[in-house]
Image (cartoon, helix red, strand yellow):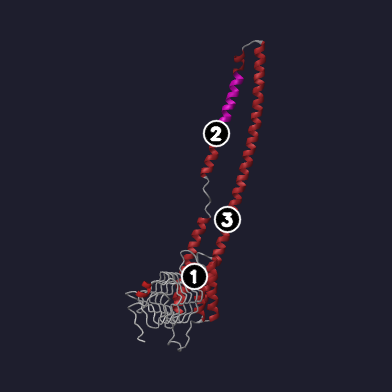
Amino acid sequence: MDRISRRSSALAALYGAQVEQSSMVAGKPPDGSKARRRRLWWITAELLALLLLVVGLVVLWVQAPAMYGTSAAATTATATTRGAILTVAAALIAATAAGAGLYITARTIRINQRALEETQRANQLAHHRELEGQVTERYSKAIEQLGSKGLDVRLGGIYALERIAVDSARDHPTVVEVLSAFVREHSNPARRGRSRAPAPSDHPQPTADVQAALTVLGRLPPREGVARAQLAAANLTGANLTGANLSGANLSGANLSGADLYRANLDGADLSGASLSRADLSRARLSRANLSSPARNPFGSPANLSGANLSGADLSGANLHLANLSGATLLRAIDVRQDQLDSARGDEGTHLPEGLDWPSSWPVDSD
């Protein structure tokens, strides 16, 4: 348990650094340089147009007498032209003042809007940091509870980790890793530091805390890229995994003897070398699951399904190479192919689905 606590503390420290980095990225303001350059271009163009108009009016004012001559009619025409120029100038001044007012008003609105957005962004960032800080605190407390000697405290830590995984997608992989390590460590009496194994039982089952951790692992919400469980070589004898979602889980070499896997989802799970003798796999999903016995099995035993109940189980695409099906019941199993049975091992006690032939390599009942 000390190894789990040290490993989890390191993960918590790394997580805190990632939170700080993500917070800095989240608080980066958007780049508005292009918008500012575009506005500057329009303002410059408008000022140039205004300047050209003013220059034109001045030239027209100065050149008006030369345009009409020195007669009495020309004098009247010059006066009329200059009066029109004054009218246009007055309108131009009014329009410029109105435009300036609109620009100042629009700029004030933009500044206020930008300030509001910055305030909202700062508030969101502060809220994000507060939530992440709360999650980190909850995680650290849950890890501390897992190391307690009290069963009720350990159970509280397990369910606290479940809540964290549900609330925080970032912490979900870490919670799976921690609970998987907890199950591996606590399901093995030797790893728990016991001087001797527990007394034999007709119906051995995991301890309450191990069963709780398995239940949580089996019901956590699916998230892309997050493993369901890493339970290689775990002792899960008699575990209750009814309806558990362990698709893609690593259960290689695990002892699932007598386990209740009714309606469990084991699609794509690695069960190579696992012991499933007398396990209830009725109506379980085992599509693309690996139930083979590798040529070089690190756990020293083949996949053992002897006496397992596979009635109604979905075995489409499952790898049964050298799997031990002695005494197993495959009646009404779904999508079982002849080549799958031919690659497995069975005996006279194996019950096959209708329409499939008895493999020639299997022993035949002399009766």
Cα gap from disc 2 to disc 1, whole angstroms: 60 Å
Q: Residue at x 36, y 84 (%)?
A: 365
Determine whether label 2 and label 1 are within 8 Å by CB.
no
Seen in the image, is 80 located left or right of residue 223?
A: right
Q: Amino acid at mark 2?
A: Ala
Which of these two is toward me, 42 or 233?
233
Vertical position of residue 31 compared to residue 353: above or below? above
Where is residue 136? Give x, y as percent. Answer: 53, 67
Would you say the magenta stretch is mainly helix, strand or loop? helix
Where is residue 329? Give x, y as percent. Answer: 43, 79
* Residue located beneath label 3 in the image: 122
- Image mark for residue 45: 2
* Residue located beneath label 1 in the image: 175
Vertical position of residue 211 compared to residue 58: above or below? below
Seen in the image, is 296 located left or right of residue 45?
A: left
Q: Is residue 184 magenta?
A: no
Q: Which residues are magenta?
A: 48-62
Residue 1 visible to the viewer:
no
Where is residue 186? Give x, y as percent. Answer: 46, 80
